[in-house]
Image: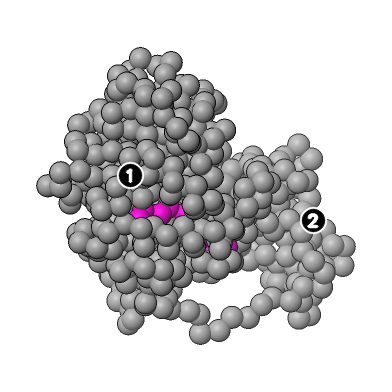
Amino acid sequence: MGYTRDRFALRMAPAGGRRAPVIHRGYYVRAQAVEHCVRAFLLSTQGCPLRQIISLGAGFDSLFFFLKSEGLLCHTVVFEVDFPDVARPKAALIRGTEELITLVGNDASAQALGATAFSGEDYRLLGVDLSELPRLEEALHRAGLDPKVPTMLLAEVVLTYMEVERSDALVQWAAGHFLHAWFILYEQIHPEDPFGSVMQNHFSRLNSHLRSLAQYPNCKAQRTRFLQRGWTECSIVNMNDFYSQVVLGEERQRIQALEPFDEFEEWHLKCSHYFILVASKGETPSPNLLFPGLEASLTHSLPCFAGTLAASACAPVSGLRRYGHRSVIIAPDVILTTGGFGDHGGRHCRLTELHALIKQKDAWQGSSVTLAEPGEAWDGRLFHSLTLLQAGWAVVFGGRRSPVRPALEVRCLRVLESASASASGTLRVELTRLLPVEDLPLPRWRHTATKVVHQGEAYMFVYGGCCSRQAVLADWCFLRLKEEEELSCQQIPVDGPVPAGRHSHSACGWAGGVLIAGGLDAAEQPLGTILFLRPAGKGFQWHSVETHPPVTPRLLWSGL
């Protein structure tokens, strides 16, 4: 797909099917973070007569071959360590590939003793269990390791699979064994939230339990872990900060253009659950300049809600495990939810069932929704808007079926017999198609559509969103519902500086206008800015709203 420039990755990785774009990005940002730190070590030690890199749990990593082909490993010996059952087939692969054997030089491992599976001019491949420190130390020294030479140790999602006592011992051994060293660690954090729970269950099903998470659940704990075990400096950031602040803007634009992408929530969640850490000791240059200004979150606490009120339910409510949906108060004490992606019979899919919550006294109960016309059905769209324009009437606008398939039809939902829904437990809804809208702007999703009143008429103000060209939209339009069967696009003047595009934001009616908050910009960065479309003269005017303190940047705010 073009995410990496490392052509040797294809030599090492077995052929497989295409993965989801968010998986591609996950591997990309991991490789970028590791390469960024390794390059920094090589640059900071380029004046040394000899340098060493030890890749712990290297697997079939291709980093050595990529760096060697780029001419970056002058005066550098690389040691790769993994289980013997991993080292042997990798050695066989190298011996059987002309391009790889040319890069590593002659194999002297036939005469070597101990755990060495392959030995080239500046490359050693060792088959050793990392938890057996005496054997690891002996194997490295037999392979030519010099503890007095500046050394970088690399562990990509390796230590977390070990018993914590053994991984801690390895961290402490490395600090005590080398005079001048860096330790680069890439692992998971935040086991306590829902994403972290799913992440742990996933690895447990693979019989690869994440053993370090309970004791080192966040960046602060990981940093303390190294500082308490002999390392004098430690710098650490999560992958959200690395991708947004360290990866250059032009490179991010290149990645965004590689394939259609609309998994922003999962992408940001995934990145928030992984980190890159660089610890150092001795006279090697400090790693603190690797991530300038990105570690404030370790000491600054995030703002929290002043208070929350949980809704009480008569019974457990099913059908609400979904995202990318929309909800609206469509009738008194009735909340209607449409679309989204979620669980249906144990399978994750686009949801076609409408869902209702009906208030009874002081509690809410779930209600099934039936369509008045048996032939009608929800079309499976998500990231649409659902706007109440008239009493009992809600307009469904935009949305998508895939990142390249926008939902083009505009639909209307009307509640029938809402008063009897409480008694029957079933809400009847009429779903109709509206006539095509003339002069309608680009099809979109992740937009907002908010009711406003202008000169006594109700309008739907549609703002922002994404389109199938991977563009973030900064336009808007006013739509008016005519005779409950047609939307028309109306020209209403809007003054003031035109705001930059955004999507995945929220909007709600406020003081006769529209308040727009949060979302993502064209660079996929969460926004903390608030806009106000204020009534002014014969139309509206854009204004920027400041808050004290500033709000936390986020996407998918909620405001009704």
Q: Is residue 328 left or right of residue 549?
A: right
Residue drawn 55% across and 68% down? 215
**Quadrant position of residue 362:** bottom right
Residue drawn 50% across and 47% down? 135
Say which residue label 2 marks.
368
Amino acid found under the numbered disc labelled 1: Leu
- Tell me residue 357's x, y (percent): 73, 65
Q: Nearer the viewer, residue 240 or 151?
A: 151
Q: Is residue 19 left or right of residue 354?
A: left
Q: Is residue 188 left or right of residue 3?
A: right
Identify the residue at the far left of this view. Answer: 47
First in sequence: mark 1 or mark 2? 1
- Tell me residue 245's x, y (percent): 28, 56
- Tell me residue 188's x, y (percent): 50, 56
The magenta stretch is 183-191
On screen, 27 above or below 323? Answer: above
